Image: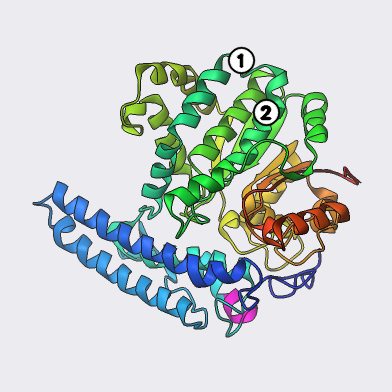
């Protein structure tokens, strides 16, 4: 694709933005984002208080961490004000990376943060003067989480801190019954080829546990939303027949790449699916692609693998009152997963690209002067080594289809972009609908959904989903 092709400000169709009040972007920006920032502020307060109580004689915790926490909170409060009052998107502030290495004269080695520079170039060149409402929804939302990271990571005592970790663990605890049931029922027969379709559906609807969607909802509202997300009835574009046929007949023990979405429950189901692919001989290597920084509240980072496996192995640390039977039902599974990791049959990795504002088609922009080295390396590895890309969740779907107003009847293959579609391995998208973009729907199905929902809310209600497949020049519809 040429460098002058589609961009964040000029996608193939008009982009979604919060200027329009009839879609899901407006309530997201005006209502959900301030709640998300407030929750981050609350977590910093709670973290500092807990650390101070546990280390009363440590001056770094008792005084300095509180001072740094207060500095971060002040900037987060300003960020929330800017969102609520429609202020322009501001440049990121952390321009340099302070390393532990030394220059020849003994002074600390300080490097330019190229990711910060790329973001600030985009703000200046792509959306100059834009507000959180007038910029594209995708760009503004990705910027929000990058800005939160920018603010917090500027404080030395908060390096490596995940302001969403407490929420991710709490959501997993709320799913105790489901994990127990699935773990007990499926572990012994996880290599059975007949389970593939069920595991794909579990992985798909596991995506309903998106904590950024739950911002501002009551516990009862969250449970109702999750209870309505199940089975194949509400999969409005369903290529599971083709996906199952491809995996069972053509994958043939090659490499599979999961581009992950949520930690906790969804990651648990994703690992069960990956385990099945290995036990049934369909995959020899599985690569899990995580976000490199805390992202969209519940997105998976490499660290989330660690606490999930630890919690499943010692369930009493996550699930109060966990029975010995639960420990036994999950222990074999966890030991097997740790063995995959130890033998590099499972690989956990991350790339800054997954935490950028760019649509996934730009992975293939190998001739663009704006493509950085790490993205080129990522694309070359995916294009040459992977036999199947499984894109999980709503955000990955938005990036696959450029988060723009493609007609719902647009073929999935067309929405991927020509350069990406001609060079990528087979693609699976498992996505619970939690935002406006949706393609690959027949005109009759779209009419039915609009009538059923009384409008376009079927696109973002979380009650419907897509399981879509693309392979080369042949789009399966």
Quarter of the figure with the N terminus? bottom right
How crowded is the residue under tag 1: few (<14 C-alpha within 10 Å), some, or many (20+)?
few
Q: CA distance from mark 2 to mark 1?
A: 12 Å
- Along the viewing direction, whichever of 53 and 186 lies nearer the viewer: 186
- State the residue position of label 1: 189
Q: Quadrant of residue 11?
A: bottom right
Q: Quadrant of residue 120?
A: bottom right
Magenta residue check for 333: no
Magenta residue check for 122: yes
* Chosen colour scheme: rainbow
Residue located farthest toward the bottom when viewing the structure as drawn: 129
- Mark carried by residue 198: 2
Vertical comparison of 350 with 158: above or below = above
> Residue at coordinates 31% horizontally, 27% vertically from top-left?
321
Q: Is residue 266 visible?
A: yes
Q: How many marks?
A: 2
- Give the SS element for disc 1: helix
| Highlighted range, magenta | 121-127
Q: Nearer the viewer, mark 2 or mark 1?
A: 2
């Amino acid at each position: 694709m040429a460098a002058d092709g589609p961009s964040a400000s000029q996608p193939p169709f008009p982009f979604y933005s919060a200027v329009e009040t009839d879609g899901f972007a407006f309530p997201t920006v005006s209502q959900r984002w301030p709640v998300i920032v407030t929750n981050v502020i609350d977590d910093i307060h709670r973290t500092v208080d807990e650390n101070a109580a546990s280390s009363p004689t440590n001056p770094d915790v008792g005084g300095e961490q509180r001072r740094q926490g207060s500095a971060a909170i002040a900037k987060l409060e300003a960020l929330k004000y800017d969102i609520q009052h429609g202020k322009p998107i501001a440049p990121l502030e952390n321009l340099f990376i302070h390393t532990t290495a030394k220059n020849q004269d003994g002074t600390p080695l300080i490097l330019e943060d190229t990711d910060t520079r790329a973001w600030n170039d985009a703000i200046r060149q792509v959306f100059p003067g834009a507000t959180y409402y007038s910029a594209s929804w995708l760009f503004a939302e990705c910027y929000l989480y990058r800005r939160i990271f920018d603010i917090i990571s500027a404080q030395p005592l908060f390096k490596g801190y995940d302001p969403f970790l407490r929420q991710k663990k709490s959501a997993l605890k709320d799913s105790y019954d489901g994990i127990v049931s699935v773990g007990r029922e499926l572990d012994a027969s996880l290599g059975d080829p007949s389970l593939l379709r069920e595991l794909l559906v579990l992985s798909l609807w596991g995506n309903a546990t998106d904590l950024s969607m739950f911002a501002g909802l009551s516990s009862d509202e969250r449970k109702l939303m999750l209870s309505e997300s199940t089975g194949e009835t509400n999969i409005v574009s369903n290529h599971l027949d083709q996906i199952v046929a491809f995996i069972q007949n053509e994958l043939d023990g090659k490499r599979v790449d999961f581009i992950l979405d949520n930690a906790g429950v969804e990651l648990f189901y994703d690992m069960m699916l990956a385990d099945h692919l290995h036990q049934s001989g369909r995959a020899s290597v599985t690569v899990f692609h995580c976000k490199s920084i805390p992202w969209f509240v519940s997105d998976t980072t490499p660290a989330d693998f660690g606490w999930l496996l630890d919690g499943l192995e010692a369930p009493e640390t996550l699930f109060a009152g966990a029975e010995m039977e639960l420990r036994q039902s999950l222990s074999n599974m966890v030991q097997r997963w740790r063995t995959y990791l130890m033998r590099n049959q499972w690989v956990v990795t991350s790339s800054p690209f997954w935490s950028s504002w760019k649509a996934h088609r730009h992975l293939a922009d190998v001739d663009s002067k704006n493509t950085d080295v790490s993205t080129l390396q990522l694309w070359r590895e995916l294009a040459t080594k992977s036999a199947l890309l499984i894109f999980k969740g709503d955000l990955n779907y938005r990036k696959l289809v450029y988060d723009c107003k493609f007609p719902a009847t647009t073929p999935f293959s067309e929405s991927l972009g020509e350069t990406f579609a001609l060079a990528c391995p087979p693609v699976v998208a498992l996505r619970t609908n939690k935002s406006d973009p949706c393609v690959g729907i027949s005109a009759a199905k779209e009419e039915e959904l609009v009538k059923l929902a009384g409008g376009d809310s079927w696109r973002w209600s979380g009650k419907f989903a897509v399981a879509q497949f693309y392979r080369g020049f042949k789009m399966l519809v």
